[in-house]
Image (cartoon, rainbow, N blue to C red):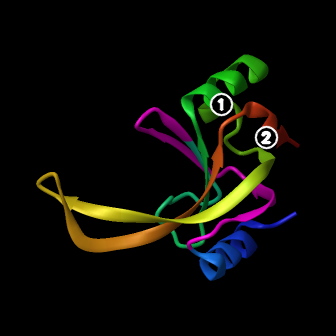
Amino acid sequence: MLQPRQAILLAAEAAPASIPGIFVLSVKATGTQNNYVYLNSEADYRDQRCLSIALTPEAAQQLTTRLGESPLIALKGRTILVQGAAIRTRINFFSNGLATDKYYYQTHVNVTNADQITVR
């Protein structure tokens, strides 16, 4: 099992490839964007030490059914195991709707099925 910092370092070294594994993290923050649910290992998702678990709408719905409430609520403060692949993801900054030449990287594990997540 890989801790967030290990996953981030390995994903950066492997970029643009991903690193498969089982990732363990405490969910310190949650959020949504573009119908995706994000479970973050740090309170600030922009923190370079943050591993973000990106749930597709389908996976989020499956987890809601399994947990009895949205993963945004049910998993905050919980420790989870996630089976998948960590990948360094470029995040562009925008100004007036257009991408600028500024960007930073996040490390994501994309989840397409709720079975990829185990709650401890």
Q: Residue at x 58, y 75 (%)?
A: 15
Query: Dot 1: within a 10 Å radius of its alpha carbon, few (fewer than 14), some, or many (20 or more) residues?
Result: many
Left or right placement of residue 39 versus residue 21 in this view: left
Could you tell me if the residues under marks 2 and 1 are in contact, i.e. CB atoms within 8 Å? yes
Q: Which residues are magenta?
A: 16-37
Task: Residue at the far left: name it.
Answer: 96
22, 15: nearer the viewer: 15
Q: Main secondary structure of the magenta part?
A: strand
Marks 2 and 1, the one that precedes in the sequence:
1
In the picture as drawn, the residue positioned furthest to the bottom comes out as 13
Query: Is 39 on the left or on the right of 78, as rendered?
Result: left
Q: Is the residue 21 above or below the residue 48 in the image?
A: above
Q: Could you tell me which residue is drawn at 60 percent across and 71 percent down?
A: 49
Residue 100 lies in quadrant: bottom left
Q: Nearer the viewer, residue 97 or 27?
A: 97
Q: Kindly state the secondary structure of the residue where label 2 is placed.
A: strand
The crowd level at tag 2 (other Cα within 10 Å; few <14, some 14-19, many 20+) is: some
Question: What's under tag 1, amino acid-wise?
Answer: Ala
Q: Which mark is residue 59?
A: 1
- Which disc number belongs to residue 117? 2
Query: Can you say which quadrant of the picture contains the N terminus?
Result: bottom right
Give the image location of residue 70, x and y in percent: 63, 25
Q: Left or right of 18: which side holds 90?
A: left
Query: Which residue sits at x=72%, y=17%?
Result: 65
Secondary structure of residue under mark 1: helix
Location of residue 60 (image quadrant): top right
Residue 36 at x, y = what percent? 50, 37
Where does the image place residue 7, in percent across and percent down from the top left?
71, 70
Q: Is 118 rendered above or below residue 91?
A: above
Q: CA distance from mark 2 to mark 1?
A: 10 Å
Magenta span includes 57: no
